[in-house]
Amino acid sequence: MKAWTALILSAALTVTGGVPVLCFVALLVWQLVTLVQTRHAAPLPAALSFPVILAAALIGLGLAAAGVLGFRRQRAALRAERRQRDDRLRRVQDYRSDGGMVDTLDGRREPFIASLPATPAPRRAGVQG
């Protein structure tokens, strides 16, 4: 449940950080359209000056980047948690369904990297066995 909450909060942080960036882009487009239509830029109030909006957009961009990174991290954690749970449940189902019968050559239920060596290990010189 904590991972889901962190995932939702990361998505909300991304959206929150995107708002000032979109505001800056909208202001820039509005100014460019006004410049093209009237041959001079529209005067802006001090609260909407480019340095103020640009600073807010840069802060918003940082927040959005942090939100995206958190979202990806939490999504990967949720995938790993789901994979572990599914593997655990699959193994339980396998053990219950086969009735104790094992059909592998070496008697293992799970795959094992070194289960059947192709050739015996070479003996080192001086070792008697």
Image: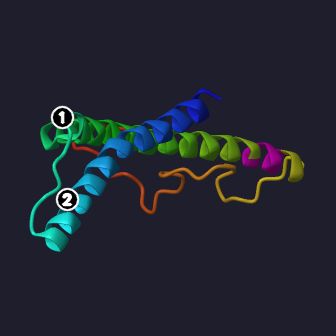
Looking at the image, residue 67 sits to the left or right of residue 108; the answer is left
The quadrant of the image that shows the C terminus is: top left
Q: Mark 1 points at which residue?
A: 46
Type of amino acid at the residue the image marks with label 2: Gln
Tell me the chief SS of the magenta region. helix
Where 21 sits versus 2, above or below?
below
| SS state under label 2 | helix
Dot label at residue 61: none
Residue 39 appears at what percent x and percent y?
10, 69
Q: Position of residue 38 (x, y in %)?
A: 15, 69
User: Could you say which is closer to the camera, residue 33 or residue 95?
Assistant: 33
Kindly identify the residue that appears in the image at 85 percent across and 47 percent down: 100
Secondary element type, mark 1: helix
Q: Where is residue 37 in the image (x, y as percent from the top left)?
A: 19, 73
Choose the circle earlier in sequence order: 1 or 2.
2
Give the residue at x 48% y 51%. 114
Residue lying furthest left in this view? 40
In this rendering, position of residue 47 left or right of residue 72? left
Q: Mark 1 belongs to which amino acid?
A: Ala
Q: In this view, does 72 lie above or below 40?
A: above
**Looking at the image, which residue is at 42% across and 61% down?**
119
Q: Does the magenta stretch include residue 31?
A: no
Which residue is tagged 2?
31
- In the image: residue 16, left or right of residue 20: right
Q: What stretch is highlighted in magenta?
A: 90-95
Instruction: Identify which residue, 82 or 73, lies in the foreground.
Output: 73
The residue most toward the front is 38
